[in-house]
Amino acid sequence: MKLKIYRFIMAGMFLVSLIGISTACDPLGIEPTTQVDEGRFWQNPQLARSYVNNFYFWTQTASGDTFQSEQWSDNAQGNAEQDWNTYRQESFNKRLYDENSGIIGFSAPWSDAYKKVYNVNLGIEKISSSDAISENLKNQLLAESYFFRAFIYFDMIKFWGTVPYVDRALTIDDDTYLPQSKREVVFDNILADLNESIKYFEGFVGNSEVGMINKDVSKAFISRVALYAANAADASAKNLYKDDPKGLFKFEKNSQHYYQIAYDAANSLIGKYSLEENYEDLFTSPNAHMSSESIWPVMFKENQRGGFNPTSKNGPDHLYYGGTEDASYAWNIRSGLFPTQDLVDSYLQKDEVDGKWKNWWETSQAKAMGVTINEDGEIEGESANYRDMYKNRDERFYATVTYDGSYMGPEEEPYIIQTWIDNTNPAVTLKYSSLHTGYRYLDRMDVAPMNRASAQTITGYYSRKYSQFNQFNNDGTLNWGLQRQTTFFNIRYAEVLLNCAEAGIKLGKADAVNHINEIRRRAGLDDYTGNNLYEEMKLQRRLEFAFEAPGFRYFDLLRWSEAEGKTTIEELNQASRGIWIFRKGVESQMVGENGYPVEEGGEGYFTPKFETFRVPYSVYERKFDNSRYYFVPFSATTLKDYTQLQQNPGWTNFIYNN
């Protein structure tokens, strides 16, 4: 890690930062930016517009189509395939930090973030002083620039807690060993930048294009940032961080101050947007960016913008059912992002007898399957109709999770996914078990599925969100690798509703339940009638945003637990849960490997059994049993040179045992 801030920012100095902004072929007659001197560059409004456009390629850390932050949470389990490390999250989940180099296998935003801060600060200064840019365009560009400065600092403090705050384009002559600002000050500066963004947008006449920042994006982002600030203020009030000699984590203002900011910002957008009628359309429709729910979409399209294609990862690394020796098509998705049983358990099921929404193991369907809770708190059952556990769930379940007996592929010819295990003959398990499970050998169930086996599900589920089954090869198989026309949302209206509800609950606002009910109704649920609206809000955030980019669950668990003064976060201090389904299989005679289930009455048939379990393998453990893990540590080599930095709480003189 480079140490001095000026090294970071000088690496992003003016001409270097402009590389790649303009095209080689320039029909407008604009000189390439690499051939325009700095003085003339800022006299060209189109080049100034291009400069700010470059900010839109920045993304939040740990987002993207591998949903890295989801793998850090209790929503998803990564794999242990040694040469497919986008999913191998063992080092981060176990908090395996190295004293000299910091985080193992992951890079928190620091040097690259300061390059971005420098670019924004330079843009603000040059655009503000340019006499060639119209006042209207200047207002738009400055509004966007102030927003992106807030965006980058917010990304940084989620990992570091507090950072040196730089609000001007430093030069090599400046003092660049800057101390950290207080956490409260950084939050306040972020909120001030977002308000400055709104002020400039109010002076802008015109409409921002879809996908670009506008005033509503800034307001929605204020509601997000202010909730984090409120939680940090609560942590300060609880004196969670005692190892803080400079008082960097102390707040003067209380959490109510920030909850009010969050509520006001979100409330100003209530009714201006509406939820998409069909939840799944947000993630599979090629026109999702135009949804009534869309506030800040990020769009991807074949041959225009690539890099976000979950379809190529959302499924099994094995064969299709129904293949023949002549055409034994394979999925070959090589996944590693598996929903957990804890997430699946969170989706309520409608009871077929009384019509009430319940935990699935409490419904009449579950009773018919003989479901019991064992001494470990896990769920067991035995039924030929065990797939009834997946019927009549919260509608978001079907858009998010692929489960045993569900289908993938085009509507006219969907393909079944099966994840059961044949437990009758350990010696031939690989031949008899289903095509789509990572558990290849019954007599090795005590050994973690590793390498390619772990690219098959180890929890019993595959992720589904953003899957578009609409691109085909010449032989009729699905083309997984081709970039889909899809969208993810940096901000959508559902977040505004839930941000407003969260702040409203803390402020005692009566409208909070209405916002939560709006979310529930879209999912097909009845209105909430319980007595713990705060916990219901947490649950709805989990279900609403599971497997989305940018991720929410991991950072939500951190901020809520921080606000409560927890030193252990149980959800992050234990391995994931999954489900094993055992049934009799028969070796496929058509594709020559793995099995089909023996139907009732067939040779060797027995009633299928299932049991949930906590993944018993050390490679998949998680650790969060100390408040130091709220933030990543500065490495010893960084602190040796950059003495103005204070080590994050709990890491001072920590003895690393990796």
Image (cartoon, grey):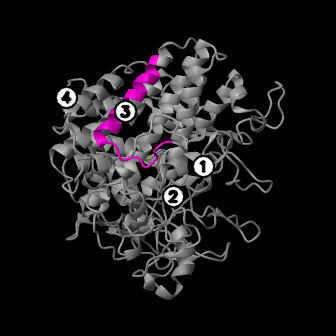
Q: CA distance from mark 3 to mark 4?
A: 23 Å
Residue 136, compared with residue 426, is above or below; it is above
Question: Residue 277: which disc?
Answer: none
Amino acid type of the residue tagged 4 in the rendering: Leu
Q: Tag 3 or tag 1, which sits nearer the N-term? A: 1
Q: CA distance from mark 1 to mark 2?
A: 11 Å
Q: Tag 4 or tag 3, which sits nearer the N-term? A: 3
Q: Residues within 10 Å of mark 2 (few under 14, many from 20)?
A: few
Q: Tag 2 or tag 4, which sits nearer the N-term? A: 2
Q: Nearer the viewer, mark 3 or mark 2?
A: 2
Residue named by callout 4: 507
Amino acid type of the residue tagged 1 in the rendering: Ala
Residue named by callout 3: 189
Q: Tag 1 or tag 4, which sits nearer the N-term? A: 1
Question: Residue 11: which disc?
Answer: 1
Q: CA distance from mark 1 to mark 3?
A: 25 Å
Are discs 1 and 2 less than 8 Å apart at CB? yes
Q: Secondary structure at mark 4?
A: helix
Question: Residue 91: horizontal and vertical position, in percent?
Answer: 43, 68
Give the main secondary structure of the magenta stretch.
helix
Are discs 1 and 3 less than 8 Å apart at CB? no
The quarter holding residue 46 reads top right
Q: Secondary structure at mark 3?
A: helix
Question: Residue 567: horizontal and vertical position, in percent?
Answer: 21, 58
Q: Is residue 186 magenta?
A: yes
